[in-house]
């Protein structure tokens, strides 16, 4: 990677698309809703349920309002990208497939120290957990690698393998830059900062200072009510979308600092119930046994 | 005799689980062998991140043949019984033999169990071991996971090598068959993938397929011949299977990497083991970071490096000159290896700095010039899992970058936190719940501050002198760092960061030290604070926690102690001992209790203090017990008292979970309050009693561990009523010294004899039996009972009179000595009873036919026993 020009941000995504496409994955586009992690995408959460095989890869914008730093921190963003791969059932050579994908984007495993360090994953919000690792490259976590064991409170039958690449981090590493905003985005003079710096500044201000909390509270309650409405009508996918929405609104409320520690648990419990209810409805709708 | 090799290959096993997995593998294997009547010469177990291996030596080729006989029914027994016997033993009727059993012909079955091939035993044992392996967490994977019954392992299991001698032990579990093949190092022994079969059909039409193919690799296979060549074959493929060897490479290599740069490695065995669990081919590498980060406290840097990155840190040797020069010398890069070493590095080979070691760099304006204490140096040692083709250059550069990002986060937190004063940070503690029944951390801080100030204001000899104002201030700020960014990131730095921030803020050193150390002592080996302000704050914090949880009915049960109350109690004991604070525990508990009550009454929480109206007199009140309240219809909420209640004016607190407002504040009718509302009532007496018992248990455990004879502790504890730890332990100490003298031993023998006689008489003369503990003995006044001084109706024998005289003389001396807390003197006074009691047993018959004599002598023995009990309950003493 030292000899030639490293890949740009968008080239990394394109290379990963190409690579995983060649492994038989459906290359999806991002889910068109705000979410805290790629795992929330229906292609991950809902597809991890039930017996049907599934392979997909996609880049997903993630929003974490409390991580906003007004564009001043070189390592933190309230909006960033994850690259997600989901392989169901998990293939026996999944580790090797993953390692080869690193070579494709310019990380030579003979030159770097790549390791699988224990990191079990749990999402109380999704009633989900799995075992796996964070993958380190020269001491930096570049990927979350998980074998889903449960989703929405249901045993995964079969187990899916999920890979989540932190794209900005990976790109900073590959390009050797110290600030996210200095990333070469397109290989033609445009930086990540050119595209997202203003967004980070304005969104941080809105997340932390401006967002109308009464409206947010109302939104939360409406999304929750709508989720239940959909569940009553046995429509798990729209119900799940409302659960995602409530989860994001909850994150915004937290960024606005209006949720006390005491209330936090009860909000989270509510989101969890909605998400789990949607998963359950999805199982029922498809006639899958728990 | 042959050797056996087992390797279980899997995806990466968490480092922290490997040590126990080795133990479990050896245990399960040994059990399986034993069940088949086999025993190995030696068993060696290895682990790497990707494999568990076991080598058992000197196994026989087969198990020994066994012949067993089973006795059946008598010859003439019904057919049913005989057939049943045959079935049970797996024989036919023809195979039975008739033998004579005490003159009775009886059927016998002779069961010959032929020896089994060890290979067959192992072939069954391996799947059994795998199926029952006790991983702390296990998972399912792959196609088989369509069923929840599929094989579970810590991470996907991919291969089994099982070789006995040179022969395969054939076995299979969930589609994984045993074989001779395993894999080497994940990268250093991998080969380009040539087979096109593994390429997905989708790729066939892709123009990039050929290029893609060249990026695909697969692990190189190794064929193992037998147990003897296993480790060496793996070594040739860049895997060191022996975890201890890897640990040595890391331990020595990291130390050498540091010393080559003129630095001292900060040793950390936990890191050695963890890194050995993360690598198959460990290569310690030295990297550096910007010395500007050294502004951040050393503990933070060390923690970031260790916890987040698993790096070792380095210190300058004492008196080394160092300073700003480092950065200039270092250039922008990490140390690179000599060009000649590229790709040749053996595990543990070290990269040499191309720059002079920092110790050789003259310091410019280092403030720490010539310090005797070792200072952290801007270097670290990471452990790579590969001898990289560039000698580790890129790996070092990458790790330096990661650490720099971590440290700049830490530096950012360090600077950001200091922009807010601790008192302002403390205001945010109201947002953190300490426990739902005990309010927020702000509530706790308020209670602790009040309590600490009271404690520091206590008058008494031998009490620590601390400025109550400083004590209160320190307590108010002691938890403020919990809301700082730094502690949010590294919870283990709580206290320490508060101390640093207090110092930076210019607070008195007494205050900053108290904030820093108030959690201490944490573990058994932890230092016990001695600064007076720290001691009081630390005591107050722990007392508040204990009293709070006990009052709320959450004392530890069994092995469950989620709030670490045992540790808090032990901390209090150690603080009291170390500072010789002779305030009775009960007093301390009372203060903490009242501080709780005060906070509760000041809060808006639905909590009321309940006292019976009949006892309500303006500001003073009393409540005898919780039971009183339920019977008393006249009670009232009362408000905060302005003083600490004295003994006898105690009260109870009730939590009303339903809320006071809902039933009308100020209601004065108990019935209305209780209507549908669950009143949780906590009485001081109950809490205090169970807490004292809790402390006593902790103290016993502590003293036992310190080598004090537990029977002596029990002997003193059995007296009851003593809650001054310092006094109690002084008594135990004096007792231990005494019972180990000849006088002590003999007195104990005399005591036991007296006690046995009294015990026998127990049923007949219960009035003599009041010495089994209880209040009478507690303060040593038991012997003054007038019954024992009845004039005798007969002329006592000489030895009897001598014992009476000795008791008359000794008792007041013992009592006085105990009151003066001179326990050695009390023991000496007791020793004077030794000769008379011996003589008494020698010359006098207790069980005299004359009932009057008999009773008087029993009473005398009881008096003797009670006299001894002034010092300790000797019945608990062994020997």
Image (cartoon, coloured by chain):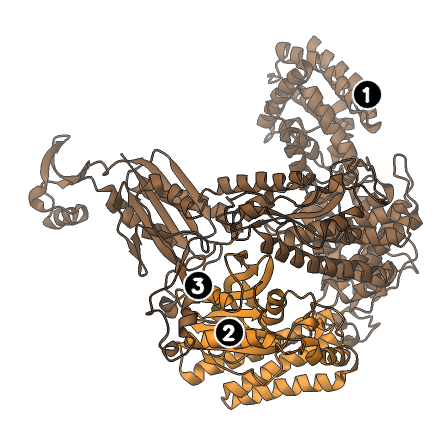
- Earlier along the polypeptide chain: callout 3 or callout 2? 2
CA distance for labels 1 and 3: 85 Å
Residue A7: image quadrant is bottom right
Q: What residue is shown at x 77% (from left), y 21% (from top)?
A: B824
Q: Badge 3: few (under 14), some or many (20 or more) residues near its Cα, within 10 Å? A: some
- Quarter where residue B660 is shown: bottom right
Q: Secondary structure at mark 2?
A: helix
Residue carrying label 2: A16
Tags 1 and 3 both on a single chain: no
The image quadrant of residue A288 is bottom left
**With respect to residue A226, does B784 lie above or below?**
above
Q: Which mark is residue B813?
A: 1
Q: Determine if residue B849 is in view.
A: yes
Give the colour of chain B.
brown
Instruction: Name the side, left or right, on which B734 lies relative to B210.
Output: right
Query: Disc 2 to disc 1, how far (Cα)?
Result: 92 Å
Query: Neighbour class for label 2 at 10 Å: few (<14), some, many (≥20)?
Result: many
Secondary element at tag 1: helix
For the C terminus of chain B, give its image quadrant.
top right
Q: Does A204 appear above or below B494?
A: below
- The location of residue A40, given as percent across then percent down, is 56, 77
Label 3 secondary element: helix
According to the image, label 3 marks what residue? A96
Closer to viewer: mark 1 or mark 3: 3
Q: Which chain is orange?
A: A
């Amino acid at each position: 990677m030292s000899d030639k020009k490293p890949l740009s941000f968008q080239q990394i995504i394109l290379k990963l698309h190409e690579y995983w496409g060649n492994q038989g994955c459906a290359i999806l586009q991002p889910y068109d809703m705000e979410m805290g992690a790629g795992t929330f995408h229906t292609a991950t959460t809902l597809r991890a349920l039930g017996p049907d095989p599934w392979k997909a890869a996609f880049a997903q914008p993630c929003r974490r309002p409390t991580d906003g730093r007004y564009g001043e921190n070189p390592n933190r963003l309230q909006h960033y990208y994850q690259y997600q791969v989901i392989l169901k059932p998990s293939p026996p050579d999944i580790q090797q497939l993953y390692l080869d994908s690193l070579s494709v984007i310019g990380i030579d495993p003979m030159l770097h120290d790549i390791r699988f360090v224990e990191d079990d994953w749990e999402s109380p919000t999704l009633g989900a957990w799995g075992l796996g690792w964070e993958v380190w490259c020269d001491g930096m976590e570049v990927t979350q690698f998980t074998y889903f064991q449960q989703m929405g409170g249901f045993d995964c039958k079969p187990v899916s393998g999920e890979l989540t690449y932190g794209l900005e981090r990976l790109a900073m590493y590959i390009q050797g830059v110290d600030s996210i905003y200095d990333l070469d985005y397109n290989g033609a003079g445009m930086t990540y900062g050119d595209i997202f710096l203003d967004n980070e500044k304005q969104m941080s201000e809105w997340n932390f200072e401006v967002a109308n909390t009464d409206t947010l509270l109302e939104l939360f309650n409406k999304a929750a009510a709508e989720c239940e409405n959909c569940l009553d009508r046995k429509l798990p996918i729209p119900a799940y979308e409302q659960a995602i929405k409530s989860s994001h609104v909850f994150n915004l409320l937290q960024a606005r600092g209006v949720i006390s520690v005491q209330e936090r648990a009860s909000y989270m419990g509510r989101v969890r119930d909605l998400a789990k209810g949607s998963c359950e409805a999805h199982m029922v709708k498809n006639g899958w046994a728990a | 005799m042959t050797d056996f090799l087992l390797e279980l290959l899997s995806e990466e096993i968490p480092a922290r689980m490997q040590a126990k997995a080795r133990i479990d593998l050896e245990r399960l294997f040994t059990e399986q062998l034993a069940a088949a009547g086999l025993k190995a010469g030696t068993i060696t177990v290895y682990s790497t991140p990707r494999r568990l291996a076991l080598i058992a030596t000197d196994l026989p080729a087969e198990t020994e043949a066994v012949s067993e006989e089973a006795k059946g029914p008598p010859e003439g027994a019904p057919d049913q019984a005989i057939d049943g016997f045959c079935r049970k033993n797996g024989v036919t009727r023809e195979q039975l033999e008739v033998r004579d059993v005490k003159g009775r012909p009886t059927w016998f079955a002779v069961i010959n169990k032929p020896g089994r091939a060890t290979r067959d035993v192992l072939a069954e044992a391996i799947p059994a071991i795998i199926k029952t392996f006790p991983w702390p967490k296990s998972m399912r994977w792959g196609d088989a996971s369509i069923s929840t019954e599929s094989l579970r392992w810590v991470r996907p299991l991919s291969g089994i090598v099982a070789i006995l001698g040179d022969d395969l032990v054939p076995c299979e579990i969930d589609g994984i068959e045993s074989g001779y093949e395993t894999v080497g190092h994940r990268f250093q022994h991998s080969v380009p993938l040539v087979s096109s079969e593994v390429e997905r059909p989708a790729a066939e039409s892709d123009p990039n397929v050929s290029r893609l193919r060249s990026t695909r690799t697969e692990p190189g296979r190794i064929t193992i011949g037998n147990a003897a060549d296993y480790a060496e074959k793996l070594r040739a493929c860049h895997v060191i299977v022996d975890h201890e060897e890897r640990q040595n490479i890391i331990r020595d290599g990291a130390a050498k990497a540091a010393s080559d740069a003129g630095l001292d490695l900060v040793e950390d065995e936990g890191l050695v083991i963890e890194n050995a669990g993360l690598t198959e081919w460990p290569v310690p590498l030295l990297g550096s970071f910007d010395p500007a980060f050294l502004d951040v406290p050393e503990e933070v840097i060390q923690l970031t490096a260790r916890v987040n990155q698993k790096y070792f840190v380095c210190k300058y040797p004492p008196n080394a000159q160092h300073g700003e020069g480092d950065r200039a010398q270092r250039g922008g890069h990490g140390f690179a290896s000599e060009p000649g070493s590229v790709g040749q590095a053996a595990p543990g080979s070290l990269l040499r700095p191309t720059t002079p070691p920092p110790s050789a760099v003259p310091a410019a304006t280092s403030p720490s010039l010539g310090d005797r204490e070792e200072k952290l140096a801007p270097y670290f040692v990471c452990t790579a899992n590969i001898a990289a083709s560039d000698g580790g250059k890129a790996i070092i550069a990458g790790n330096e970058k990661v650490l720099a990002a971590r440290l700049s986060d830490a530096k950012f937190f360090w600077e950001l936190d200091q922009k807010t004063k601790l008192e302002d940070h403390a205001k945010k503690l109201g947002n953190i719940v300490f426990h739902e029944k005990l309010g927020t951390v702000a509530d706790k801080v308020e209670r602790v501050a009040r309590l600490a100030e009271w404690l520091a204001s206590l008058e008494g000899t031998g009490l620590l002198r601390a400025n109550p104002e400083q004590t209160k201030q320190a307590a108010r700020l002691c938890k403020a760092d919990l809301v700082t960014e730094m502690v949010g990131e590294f919870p283990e730095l709580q206290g320490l960061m508060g101390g640093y921030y207090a110092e930076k803020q210019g607070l008195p050193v007494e205050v900053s030290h108290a904030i820093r150390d108030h959690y201490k002592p944490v573990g058994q080996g932890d230092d016990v604070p001695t600064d007076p302000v720290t001691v009081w704050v630390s005591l107050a914090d722990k007392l508040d926690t204990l009293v709070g949880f006990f009052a709320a009915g959450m004392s530890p049960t069994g092995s469950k102690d989620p709030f670490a109350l045992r540790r808090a109690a032990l901390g209090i004991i150690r603080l009291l001992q170390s500072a010789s604070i002779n305030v009775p525990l009960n007093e301390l508990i009372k203060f903490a209790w009242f501080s709780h009550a005060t906070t509760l009454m000041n809060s808006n929480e639905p909590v009321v203090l309940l006292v019976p109206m009949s006892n309500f007199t303006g500001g003073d009140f009393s409540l005898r017990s919780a039971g009183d309240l339920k019977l008393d219809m006249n009670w009232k909420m009362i408000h905060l008292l302005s003083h600490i209640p004295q003994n006898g004016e105690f009260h109870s607190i009730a939590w009303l979970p339903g809320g006071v407002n809902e039933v009308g504040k100020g209601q004065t009718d108990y019935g209305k309050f209780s209507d549908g509302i669950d009143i949780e009532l906590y009485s001081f007496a109950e809490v205090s009693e169970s807490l004292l018992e809790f402390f006593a248990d902790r103290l016993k455990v502590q003293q036992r561990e310190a080598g004090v004879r537990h029977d002596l502790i029990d002997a003193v504890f059995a007296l009851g009523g003593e809650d001054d730890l310092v006094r109690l332990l002084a008594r135990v100490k004096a007792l231990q010294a005494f019972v180990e003298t000849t006088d002590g031993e003999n007195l104990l023998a005399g005591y036991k004899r007296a006690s046995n006689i009294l015990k026998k008489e127990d049923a007949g003369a219960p009035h003599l039996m009041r010495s089994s503990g209880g209040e009478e003995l507690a303060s040593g006044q038991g012997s003054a009972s007038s019954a024992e001084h009845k004039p005798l109706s007969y002329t006592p024998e000489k030895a009897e009179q001598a014992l009476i005289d000795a008791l008359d003389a000794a008792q007041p001396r013992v009592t006085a000595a105990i009151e003066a807390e001179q326990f050695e003197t009390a023991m000496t006074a007791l020793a004077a009873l030794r000769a008379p009691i011996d003589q008494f047993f020698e010359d006098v018959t207790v069980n005299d036919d004359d009932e009057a004599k008999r009773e008087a002598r029993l009473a005398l023995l009881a008096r003797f026993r009670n006299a001894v009990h002034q010092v300790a309950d000797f019945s608990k003493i062994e020997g």
